[in-house]
Amino acid sequence: MKTVEESTPPDMATAIFVIRRLYQESISCSISRLPKMYRYLYVSHGRSGGGNTRTDLDAIASVALFWRGALNKGLVRGEDFEVDFLDYYENGLDRLLRYRDVSAFVADVPPEALARPGMPETTEHLLATLLRLRDQNVSVNFVDHHPLSAMTSRLFHGFVREGLMESAILSEMDAEADRVRLIEDKFCAAEMSLALLQNRFLVTPDEEMLRIARFARDQDFGIRLIPEANRISTVIGADFNPIAMAEHLAHGRFWCDELDAICRAQEARIRRSISSLQFDWREWRLRSGRSIPVVYALLPPDDSLRVTVAGIHCLEERGARVAVIVHRHPFISIRMDREESELHAGRMLTPLGGGGHRGAASAGGRGKSFPYREANESNFHDVVQRIDNHLRSSAPESFA
């Protein structure tokens, strides 16, 4: 039987060999210090330790579906399974290193946020983490719906072939396919997670599971026609603990007095925060000859307004076709009108180590290539100019 190095393309084989040596020389935590074992671990993106939770309904719904599926099979949280959230922008998959001897299902984490094109150090870090997870007998199962390049797809399927992941269920769409494909032909992460439960674990979805998936789809694709889902997203935007929200959904509790009170307070906070947004309007002339209004919005300094809410305001209330949300720290988010098909937000932010869908994407970083280090009222227009220059140059085929 071939070793990992013998059966892997030379570039990956070299990286695995070097990283394994470094890992063996520098490992500092012993297996005995790791937490108790579970059979299953259900994970998505976010933070549950306070502050900005960096999550959304699709991520929470994916965890909730796995959770409810386990409950319906008679499994018990804390004994048979556990749930968690990880901040992939900060630490990739490193949070999984807290576990051992478990099948981990990771949903709604973009592969190209872990192995960023043009940033080989991120792929090296991911390889090192996967090697350590394999040593800890953590079987990683990946479920994601974000577009990705053919190179990244081959990389992740290579991880599966070499035993660094147990499975990888990916969208297999690149940015161009994602741009032209109709929403009706796409799936959100929660829908893909539900399909995995049906096909691999023979879970028969009940009405609550179907409802969770419908809510996730409505929000993730910007449809927003389900009022109940809109309200849940408002609560999530208030930094409500994502594990607590997943628990509510997993137990079929879609609303309660606690969530209602949080929602009302957040709506009032949003109204106050929107009034403090600062705008810079631009016009983009596209290759087709169309000119579209683009607005850059600087978020308030108190972190009281979330990207989704700011984006909805810019698109629906201000009439922009594209909204570029500028954070005070080095982080950019793009939201586009659902009918805008000539541009792809994820492709435009890929050179900055970000990514996402046609209509929604984000990128952040402190490297020299990022357009700014800090944004505020005094330098906002200069920051916008630098960002605008980058976005135009990142997709020259789309602009006149």
Image: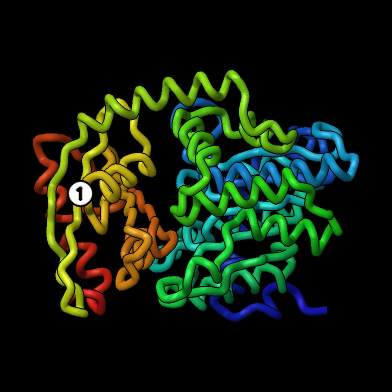
- Residue positioned 47% across, 74% down in the render: 181
The kind of residue tagged 1 is: Tyr
Q: Which residue is mark 1?
A: 296
Please identify the quarter of the rendering in which residue 175 is found: bottom left
Its colouring scheme is rainbow
Whether residue 14 is visible, yes or no, is no
- Name the outermost residue toward the right: 74
Relative to residue 67, is residue 95 drawn left or right?
left
Q: Position of residue 361 (x, y in %)?
A: 39, 56
Q: Quadrant of the C terminus?
A: bottom left
Relative to residue 380, is residue 20 drawn left or right?
right
- Residue positioned 73% across, 50% down in the render: 104
Q: Position of residue 206 (x, y in %)?
A: 79, 48
Please identify the quarter of the rendering in which residue 389 is found: bottom left
Front residue of this view, candidates 117 and 384: 384
Relative to residue 356, is residue 374 drawn left or right?
left
- Residue positioned 21% across, 70% down in the render: 393
Relative to residue 352, is residue 211 drawn left or right?
right
Q: Position of residue 211 (x, y in %)?
A: 66, 47
Q: Position of residue 159 (x, y in %)?
A: 66, 68
- Which SS class for mark 1? strand
Mark 1 surroundings: few (<14), some (14-19) or many (≥20) residues within 10 A: many
Whether residue 217 is visible, yes or no, is yes
- Residue positioned 75% across, 47% down in the render: 207
Tell me if residue 59 comes above or below residue 253 in the rendering. below
Please identify the quarter of the rendering in which residue 192 is found: bottom right
Front residue of this view, candidates 367 and 31: 367
